[in-house]
Image: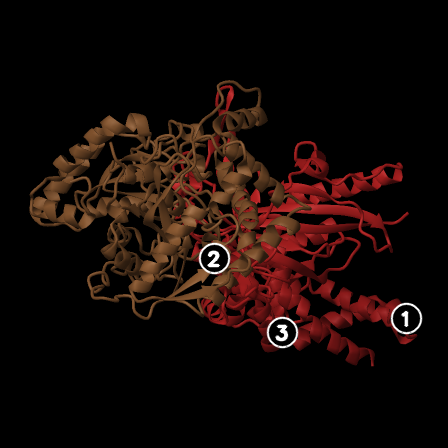
């Protein structure tokens, strides 16, 4: 059952072969058994979860239900959920109970989904290995010595270890796609503005976007159907008609279901920095797409090498301001003793934030300071437009862009913690997509053996044009019809 | 040395919207602390701002009212600083691209004992939308400071002038004019006690005749025109004395203490924050189209300057009279009502601006609370026009009306103020006066024009003020040949 697709689970629930309570209990039991080791969840509240499962069963009994009613999901702890502790994996919010629901949470509530708990993450989503979490690292289910990626590391491990049917994540510079690659599942970062950011604790507002993390493209489509949609409480939410992201999936049959599809391969994605074993997996996957009827075209994203420096100016700038509200005055951590107001601010923030968060607040404050703003922030904004323009040019020649989602397979815990720049390079292939506001996804494309001979998952990244999520999911789904990477799960758990 | 004071104003006007600048929370004044603080006002993790369209309309109204350049696209920025009553750790404001650009406001500076009244154009630099902070409350909880976030997020329009004013009187005249204007167009209730209209005044001095601006000090949060006048006068004097004593002025923010009448520096600009402004990524740029402007314009009342032009052309009033009468909507409405009740416009203007305004000022009454109705004033003016009473007698009737002694004709009757217009009676008086003042008659005949006026005065006195002065003039002239 734990390896079933969302569609299969939905059918079993609808036909009452299994109840939501039974399904939920199965996951809760698995969580009790595995979470102490994997540390995917930071907050579990069985009573709340089971109450939702019961409510879902009641809905199913009356016939008032949808595809996700009764399905147990994991929620990244960046989403405010009413009555739930919502921490962003920070000491700053260790005891914060949200009095309101994020838009994403209320969408899943309305759909009748069950919340299994809040998942671990890099503190305030700042990190690529989940090692900056105040609640400790998360184990990669494929190799417990290794990281799951980040920042959505808890959701990633939960999906990979089948500690949930599917999960939510957020992606500011690759935080859905890189963990999806490292943990071997399907993760989609939608076009900026497709999913409301209301109630999602802000890291870098102009880049943050929530998306689904699930076993398959089809599962992601079902999740996105619930998550996407206009929300007037988010001014950057785009007011466009609701889509059914599953609408084209069934038609992808026959020899060459992707005939006519033009896939662009950016030469910059296959240059220095990409490990050979990952490159090989990606090439094999591209060959598979050729068999499905696609045409391969070389494209160029000449400014891609600037995306990391630009990101590490803009994201910290926005973060330094976004995190100013955590001042110990109204909620969150406040130092036990202090002399005056300034002392309270300094002690509360010094104690409440971890090292990576502090580093980014410092960088962000610096680049916005008088005398530096033009040289850093303004310059970075200009280059951001050039990076976006690269994609506009590329999409004149192709329908989607493909490449790796991460430069290597999962690395060992502690391997990159002392070298922030090496850690930042993890997002070499993902960050430009956020800077341009485009949708990107990672699908399991195979395995590469590491130095110790262990097989670790590799993700193929698919980058689409604005609001082209339905097409991207179709392209992922077509591949998943002829491969079984997405059904593999770690042995022994 | 002769000194010149240079003054510029920044005024925070609280916009009369139902909800806050970036959230749906209510803006009603005076509620129990933190009862009007929604999740956005408190800045809970994850909340986002949504621009209040009503506040944007207020800004457009103001832009139209001062004939300003308006940005088709303006940007909201974050002004970053820590303060307990600033929940997000930043204020959303407009920095580089404000919604309202350059405009003009014409002020009327009233006459003083030594100077004539005059008009002056004050240039507006910009007006931008922003949100207010909450309040720190220091006396509610023993030994602690409390935070009330009811006001946090209240929409403000900050209106900034060029350093165009050269006296406390000009600054106050500008502030009063602006105060009337924002109420006229219905964007601000003007309540200074509740903080709906707060002025920061930048003051510097320089030797008269020089161009270079002196170092300015900013007087913060003046909430009455009287205090503004006092504060500027004190500050100006202090700066002049400091410079004359060989000192220098440090740029600073100062507070006015109404008890002592003094200004005192609260912090010097050196210690000021670097606000790290940058465009707020949570908000899209604000777009104001020609259609938006046209729609707002259609809903606006006739503006003071339009009304002023109409008063000049329709009623042949001088531009000073027309602008004085349009200083406030209530004053203009009253004047129009007097004219509509049959009074001659010029005469109506003189009485509304003269006797009525003086009386209202003396008794600190607003024109809306005048005990004398526009209809009553028009009836009084009619009796002057038809020669029933003289101007002097009219003043007594005016006092009677003010005191509620009845209607115009009844008061004239009761006080016996009816003017004598009977030629025979007036001639008799003139004959008496001429007989008794032969010396004056001789002077007049010797060419002294003044003597004629003295004779008229004698005739009026002899008639106890009731003789029609025009007739006296005419008959007297005829008699003296």
Q: Residue at x 82, y 78 (%)?
A: B480
- Label 2, secondary structure: give it: helix
**Which residue bears the numbered disc 1?**
B443
Of the numbered discs 3 and 1, the one sitting upstream in the chain is 3
**Residues beneath discs 2 and 3 located on the same chain:** no
Q: The C terminus of chain A lies in which quarter of the figure?
A: top left
**Which residue bears the numbered disc 2?**
A436
* Residue B1 picture location, percent across and down: 91, 47
Hue of chain A?
Answer: brown
Q: Can residue A469 be spotted in the picture?
A: no
Is B293 located above or below residue B247 in the figure? below
* Mark 3 or 1, closer to the camera: 3
Hue of chain B?
Answer: red
Q: Chain of mark 2?
A: A
Q: CA distance from mark 2 to mark 3?
A: 59 Å
**Which residue bears the numbered disc 3?**
B312
Q: Residue at x 49, y 30 (%)?
A: A353
Circle 3: is it few (<14), some (14-19), or many (20+) Cα within 10 Å? some
Is B374 located above or below residue A333 in the figure? below
* Residue B56 picture location, percent across and down: 48, 58
């Amino acid at each position: 059952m734990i390896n079933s697709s969302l569609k299969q689970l939905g059918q079993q629930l609808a036909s009452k072969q299994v109840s939501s309570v039974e399904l939920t209990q199965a996951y809760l039991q698995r969580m009790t058994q595995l979470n102490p080791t994997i540390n995917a969840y930071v907050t579990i509240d069985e009573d709340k979860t089971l109450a939702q499962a019961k409510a879902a069963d009641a809905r199913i009994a009356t016939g008032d239900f949808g595809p996700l009613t009764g399905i147990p999901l994991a929620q990244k702890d960046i989403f405010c959920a009413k009555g739930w502790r919502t921490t962003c994996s920070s000491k700053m919010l260790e005891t914060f109970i949200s009095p309101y629901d994020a838009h994403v949470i209320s969408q899943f509530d309305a759909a009748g989904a069950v919340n299994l708990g809040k998942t671990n993450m890099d503190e305030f989503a700042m990190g690529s290995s989940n090692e900056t979490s105040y609640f400790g690292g998360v184990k990669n289910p494929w190799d417990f010595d290794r990281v799951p990626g980040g920042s959505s590391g808890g959701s990633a491990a939960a999906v990979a270890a089948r500690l949930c049917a599917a999960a939510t994540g957020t992606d500011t510079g690759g935080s859905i796609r890189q963990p999806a690659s490292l943990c071997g599942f399907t993760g989609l970062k939608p076009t900026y503005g497709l999913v409301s950011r209301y109630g999602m604790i802000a890291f870098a507002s102009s880049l943050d976007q929530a998306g689904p993390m699930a076993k398959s493209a089809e599962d992601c489509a079902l999740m996105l159907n619930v998550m996407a949609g206009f929300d007037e409480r988010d001014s950057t939410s785009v007011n466009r008609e609701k889509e059914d992201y599953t609408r084209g999936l069934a038609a992808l049959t026959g020899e060459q279901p992707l005939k006519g599809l033009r896939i662009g391969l950016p030469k910059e994605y296959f240059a220095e920095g990409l490990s050979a074993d990952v490159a090989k997996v990606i090439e094999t996957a591209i060959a598979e797409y050729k068999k499905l009827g696609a045409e391969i075209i070389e494209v160029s994203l000449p400014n891609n090498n600037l995306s990391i420096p630009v990101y590490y100016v803009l994201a910290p700038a926005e973060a330094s301001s976004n995190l100013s509200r955590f001042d110990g005055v109204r909620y969150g951590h406040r130092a036990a003793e202090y002399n005056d107001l300034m002392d309270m601010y300094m002690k509360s923030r010094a104690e409440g934030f971890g090292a990576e968060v502090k580093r980014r607040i410092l960088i962000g404050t610096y680049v916005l300071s008088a005398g530096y703003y033009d040289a850093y922030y303004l310059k970075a904004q200009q280059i951001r437009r050039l990076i976006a323009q690269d994609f506009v040019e590329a999409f004149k020649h192709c329908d989607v862009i493909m490449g790796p989602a991460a430069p290597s397979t999962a690395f060992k815990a502690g391997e990159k913690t002392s070298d922030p720049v090496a850690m930042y390079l993890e997002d070499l292939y993902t960050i430009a997509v956020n800077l341009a506001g485009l949708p990107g996804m990672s699908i399991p494309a195979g395995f590469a053996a590491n130095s110790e001979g262990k097989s670790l998952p590799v993700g193929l990244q698919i980058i689409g044009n604005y609001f082209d999520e339905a097409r991207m999911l179709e392209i992922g789904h077509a591949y998943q019809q002829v491969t079984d990477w997405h059904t593999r799960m770690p042995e022994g758990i | 040395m002769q000194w010149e004071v240079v003054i510029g104003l920044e005024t925070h006007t609280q916009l009369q919207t139902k909800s806050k600048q970036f959230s749906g929370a209510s803006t009603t004044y005076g509620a129990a602390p933190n009862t009007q603080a929604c999740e956005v006002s408190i800045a809970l993790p994850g909340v986002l701002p949504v621009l209040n369209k009503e506040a944007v309309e207020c800004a457009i109204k103001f832009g139209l009212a001062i004939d300003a350049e308006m940005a088709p696209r303006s940007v909201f920025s974050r002004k970053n600083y820590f303060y307990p009553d600033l929940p997000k750790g930043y204020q959303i404001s407009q920095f580089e691209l404000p919604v309202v650009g350059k405009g003009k406001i014409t002020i009327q500076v009233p006459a003083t004992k030594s100077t004539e009244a005059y008009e002056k154009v004050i240039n507006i630099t910009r007006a931008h939308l922003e949100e207010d902070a909450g309040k720190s409350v220091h006396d509610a909880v023993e030994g602690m400071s409390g935070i009330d976030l009811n006001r946090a997020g209240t929409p403000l329009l900050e209106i900034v002038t060029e350093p165009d004013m050269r006296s406390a009187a000009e600054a106050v005249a500008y502030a009063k004019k602006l105060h009337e204007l924002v109420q006229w167009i219905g964007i601000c209730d003007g309540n200074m006690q509740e903080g709906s209209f707060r002025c920061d005044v930048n003051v510097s001095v320089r030797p008269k005749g020089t161009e270079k601006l002196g170092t300015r000090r900013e007087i913060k949060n003046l909430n009455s025109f009287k205090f503004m006048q006092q504060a500027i006068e004190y500050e100006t004097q202090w700066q002049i004395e400091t410079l004359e004593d060989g000192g220098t002025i440090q740029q600073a923010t100062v507070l006015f203490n109404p008890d002592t009448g003094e200004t005192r520096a609260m912090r010097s600009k050196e210690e000021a924050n670097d606000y790290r402004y940058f465009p707020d990524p949570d908000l899209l740029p604000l777009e104001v189209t020609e259609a938006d402007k046209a729609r707002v314009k259609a809903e606006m009342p006739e503006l003071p300057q339009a009304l002023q032009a109409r008063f000049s052309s329709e009623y042949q009033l001088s531009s000073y009279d027309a602008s004085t009468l349009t200083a406030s909507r209530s004053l203009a409405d009253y004047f129009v009502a007097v004219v509509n009740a049959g009074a001659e416009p010029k005469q109506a203007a003189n009485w509304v601006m003269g006797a009525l305004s003086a009386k209202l000022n003396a008794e600190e009454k607003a024109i809306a609370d005048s005990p004398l109705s526009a209809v009553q004033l028009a009836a009084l003016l009619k009796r002057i026009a038809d020669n029933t009473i003289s101007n002097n007698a009219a003043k007594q009737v005016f006092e009677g009306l003010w005191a509620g002694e009845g209607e115009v004709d009844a008061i004239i009757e009761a006080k016996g103020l009816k003017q004598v217009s009977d030629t025979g009676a007036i001639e008799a008086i003139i004959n008496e006066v001429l007989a008794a003042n032969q010396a004056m008659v001789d002077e007049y005949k010797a060419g002294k024009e003044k003597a004629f006026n003295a004779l008229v005065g004698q005739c009026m006195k002899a008639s106890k003020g009731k003789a029609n002065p025009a007739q006296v003039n005419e008959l007297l002239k005829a008699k003296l040949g």
